[in-house]
Amino acid sequence: MFTPHTPQDVEAMLKAIGLSKLEDLFQEIPEQYRFPELNLPPALSEMEVNQDLESIARANGNTSELISFLGAGAYDHYVPAAVDMLLRRGEFYTAYTPYQPEISQGTLQATFEYQSLICNLTGMDVANASHYDGATAAAEAVILAYHHFKGKRTKFLISRAVNPQYRRVIRTYMRGNSEISILGDDEKTGIDASMEKLIAQIDTNTALVMVQYPDFFGRIIDYKPLAEAVHAAGALLAVSVNPTALGVLTPPGEFGADIVTGEGQPLGIPLSYGGPYLGIFAVTNELLRKISGRLIGQTVDAAGELAYVMTLTAREQHIRREKATSNICTNQGLMALASTVYLSLLGKHGFEQVANLCYQKAHYAANQIESIPGYNLAFSETPFFHEFVISSPMPVDHLLDHLRAYDILGGYDLSKDYPELENCLLMAVTEKIRKDDIDLFHDALLGVTHD
């Protein structure tokens, strides 16, 4: 055991507080509760503990051993080795949110570069660094819109094709405000791609309309008509993005988005059993002073040298808590750095190549699966990026169990969140999936179909 304090240290501390021995610290606790007998297992050596933990870990599946077609918000992309190598540098790995930020020029520059890259990717004016994940970023968009209209608009339309987890987090965030009405995540708005039902619900009390791009089912939808309808009503349009798709799709800033959020996990961050991840958040200049989280600016110091500063800090909860836009304290700085390194390593053309590989491989997979009698694309009339929905002739849980026998994680059962999509499977294909993996998936489906 490592004991940080010497007997002399302990004696000095006790003397400072007027006590003679350590036991005196526990005088307020009834004697019968001070040192209870603990039913603990026998002590183990470090070697034995390591062996036990390795045995437990081996029981878990991982994407180095299994072929993963899982998506639904978290994706198995290739992460270059340089990303982890740079993250593990001590000056980054142990860095905390700087409250005297100007002395942390390296951290500030990395954050500034991240914000610049996100602006380039999304087509927006300003980006922050950062929120915890895509779900919390989406919830912060609702908070921003509420304060933007000073609480005078209380209607929020969230498309039912937005990630169900995001919608649940939004409702949790806003539960304490009885004025707010969150609509859209029910069957009234449907899950069709036409946007007609969503547009029909927009009125002068609408503060925000939120959609996903591509949507939760992987579909690529033209949101220009929606953006026009939203702005005609004086409301804001929030778009939750898959950043990888922006390597080949039109940035949301070019079709009228006021707020862009998203999950940054595809940008060089491993799956890691669900986190830590990265919440992307970017806005137009009009909303600059409403955005929460860290904002880093570029300037010059007293000697005229390039320098970086944390700007608009009056919005921060550690300075003016009662007037802060949000209580974002420990931002995901290390995750933002991972995304910065990833995007910098790939560059514009490399990132486009990753997006294109995802698109091409997904379409090859969809064609292979559709060739099997009984399996169809559920939304064949709408283009998709690297996720798509397959309608199965059998229950999805049975199908997934069969695929697991082939060491394949087959996808996500949509009936968990969309009862009307019974026997529908959401599949994702990334650049890591090989043609042989897709062909094996095809053959496995043939096998279960003929059982």
Image: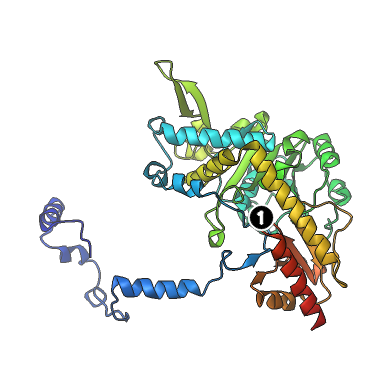
Image quadrant in which you'd find residue 372: bottom right
Residue 89 image point, x, y percent: 40, 44
Q: Is residue 268 visible in this depiction of the protein?
A: yes
Residue 109 lies, with reference to residue 273, above or below; the image says above
At mark 1, the secondary structure is helix
Query: Which of these two is toward me, 385 or 208?
Result: 385
Q: Is residue 250 left or right of residue 291?
A: right
Q: Tag 1: residue type?
A: Tyr
Residue 166 image point, x, y percent: 66, 55
Question: In this figure, which residue is indicated by the disc labeled 1?
Answer: 166
Q: Quadrant of the N terminus?
A: bottom left
Residue located 81% across and 64% down the image: 368
Q: In this view, does 243 lie to the left or right of 314?
A: right
Residue 37 lies, with reference to residue 169, above or below; the image says below
Label 1 neighbourhood size at 10 Å, few (<14), some (14-19), many (20+)?
Answer: many
Q: In this view, does 35 lie to the left or right of 251?
A: left
Residue 82 lies, with reference to residue 313, above or below; the image says below
Residue 370 lies, with reference to residue 38, above or below; the image says above
Query: Which of these two is toward me, 281 or 199?
Result: 281
Query: Which of these two is toward me, 82 or 3?
Result: 82
Residue 48 image point, x, y percent: 33, 75
Q: Is residue 89 left or right of residue 356?
A: left
Residue located 67% across and 29% down the image: 286
Residue located 31% across and 72% down the image: 47
